[in-house]
Amino acid sequence: MTSPFHKVVRKISHKLDEYEAAVVDRYTAVGENLTQTRVRVKRSLDSQEKKLSDKLEHCEAAIVSSYTTMGEHLTQTQERLKDKLNSQERKISEKAAHLLSKSGVPKTLRDKLSGECLAIEAEPLDSQGRVNSSKESFDPQEPRKDSFDDQSTVTSDLECSYTEFHTDDAVINKARIPREKVALQEFISRGAFGKVYKGTYNGQLVAVKTMSDVDSFVKEIKMACTMSHPNIVQFIGHIVFAVSDDLLDHLNDLVFVIHYLKNPAHSLTVSSSGGLTQHITGTVESF
């Protein structure tokens, strides 16, 4: 007959076997779950890596295509601009030839324009497609006798950036004089607000002042209108027009103020240094 002690021992042994089997089953299930999770994570990583690789290839192809298209567009634009510049150069050359063929153009101006046209055609383009040109030097002391009337046709054809100055000021309008009566001879000096030239008005020796600022010009005219001294200076008038003259620096010399020494005893002379000399006791600075 089995004793109670042996019965208790068998029960404890059965319980231990049951717990051991449960623990083994539990660990087996956890291991299988971990294996499945690892497989799923690996598959997900492989899928994401493939997607990223595809996206990188697509972006690289898009960038290459964009830069290729941009390069083709820039090349086409460069060709169009080059054709346009060549067309403009041909038009300018044709227009210059047309101007030079007209009658009334001074020989000096014709020679100068011809030389500049040839220089432009001979100049190579720089890296930015611009013509390398240098400004032609000139001697301001060289005597010239070109009248404003000789340049009227040239001025109109060149389409200057300045046009005739219009004002309702009675003082300014009353002081206008015909430009064909004024002729420049030579450069005298440069002042703070303009340049002074020796010239003639109706054959009489005068001083011609050029200015480019309209406001300063109006003030100068109004001040000059008050000048009238038999032994010093008298204001004659003004011309308001852009004039093309080799003696001037450029076409932007817009306005002209005319003075002259009324008394022949105090005539206008040009010193060796190019300054304006007035042989009078009190020097009046009109320019």
Image: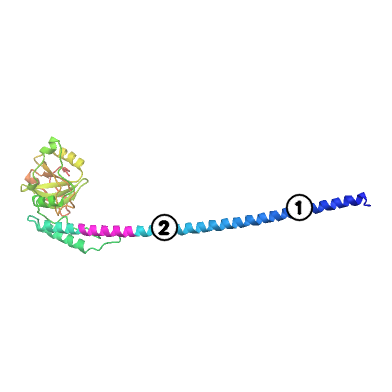
Proximity of marks 2 and 1: CB atoms separated by less than 8 Å:
no
Secondary structure, magenta segment, majority class: helix
Q: Can residue 41 be spotted in the picture? A: yes
Q: Is residue 102 above or below residue 176?
A: below
- Residue 22's label in the rendered image is 1
Q: Which residues are magenta?
A: 72-88
- Residue 71's label in the rendered image is none
Please give left or right for residue 264 compared with residue 48 in the image: left
- Check disc 1 and report its element: helix, strand or loop: helix
Q: Residue furthest front?
A: 1
- Name the one closer to the observer, 195 or 249: 249
**Residue at point 63% right, 56% down?**
38
Q: CA distance from mark 2 to mark 1?
A: 61 Å
Q: Can residue 138 be spotted in the picture? A: no
Please give left or right for residue 45 compared with residue 266 in the image: right
- Name the one closer to the observer, 33 or 100: 33
- Check disc 2 and report its element: helix, strand or loop: helix
User: In the rendered picture of this protein, how many numbered marks are placed on residues?
Assistant: 2
Give x and y (percent) for residue 203.
5, 48
- Where is mark 2, residue-wise? 63
**Disc nearer the start of the sequence (2/1):** 1
Amino acid carrying label 2: it is: Ile
- Using the rendered view, name the quadrant where residue 95 is placed: bottom left
- Name the one closer to the observer, 240 or 31: 31
Query: Is residue 79 shown in magenta?
Result: yes
Give x and y (percent) for residue 236.
10, 42
Query: Circle 1: is it few (<14), some (14-19), or many (20+) Cα within 10 Å?
Result: few
**Residue at point 12% right, 38% down?**
173
Q: Residue furthest left?
A: 203
Give x and y (percent) for residue 198.
12, 50
**Residue at point 91% right, 50% down?**
5
Give x and y (percent) for residue 112.
15, 59
